[in-house]
Image: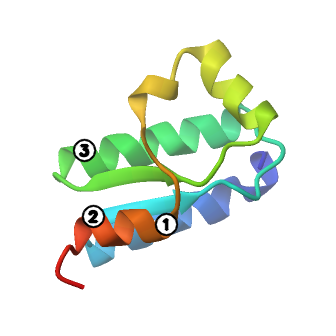
Amino acid sequence: VDADEEDLLRAAWDEADEVRLPATAVDLSAVTFADSTLLGTLLDAQDRHHRDGRAFVLAGTLARQVHFLFAVTGTLGYFTLAASVQQVIDQTNPDT
């Protein structure tokens, strides 16, 4: 994910803000390349969700390059991680 996809990501965050579900899960398991664009949009989304009292969760196993991006920038700890989107759904809706 790089600058070519930035508008799509920001549109997704806008939609999440409009819908106002209790949690947004972003499955990064298929992402094999990421740069500061992805990191910046994820941090923005995390801030937006936090301000509104909603959860923002990164789901799936992170590819080595994606994990490295978070590790080298010291931002991995800023995010809540889950093994899968289903795990986020189950934790958000325990009665389902």
Front-most of 94 and 13? 94
* Whether residue 74 is situated above or below residue 88 in the rendered picture: above
Question: In the rendered image, which residue does mark 1 sit on?
Answer: 85
Q: Which of the two discs, 2 and 3, labels the residue nearer the N terminus? A: 3
- Between the C-alphas of marks 1 and 3, the distance is 19 Å
Label 1 with label 2: CB-CB less than 8 Å: no
Instruction: Give how far across and how far down residue 17 sits, in percent.
Output: 32, 66
Amino acid type indicated by mark 1 = Val
The C terminus, quarter of image? bottom left
Quarter assignment of residue 10: bottom right
Question: In the rendered image, which residue does mark 3 sit on?
Answer: 50
Amino acid type indicated by mark 3 = His
Q: Is residue 40 among what the camera can see?
A: yes
Residue at 54% across, 15% down: 74
Local SS, label 2: helix
Question: In the rendered image, which residue does mark 2 sit on?
Answer: 91
Amino acid type indicated by mark 2 = Gln
Local SS, label 3: helix
Instruction: Give how far across and how far down residue 2 sits, in percent.
Output: 78, 45
Front-most of 60 and 12? 60
State the residue lying farthest toward the bottom: 96
Q: Which of the two discs, 1 and 3, labels the residue nearer the N terminus? A: 3
Instruction: Give how far across and how far down residue 29 sits, in percent.
Output: 69, 55
Horizontally, residue 4 falls left or right of residue 51, namely: right
Q: Which of the two discs, 1 and 2, labels the residue nearer the N terminus? A: 1
Q: How many other residues sit within 10 Å of disc 3, few (<14), some (14-19) or many (≥20)?
A: few
- Between the C-alphas of marks 1 and 2, the distance is 10 Å
Quarter assignment of residue 62: top right
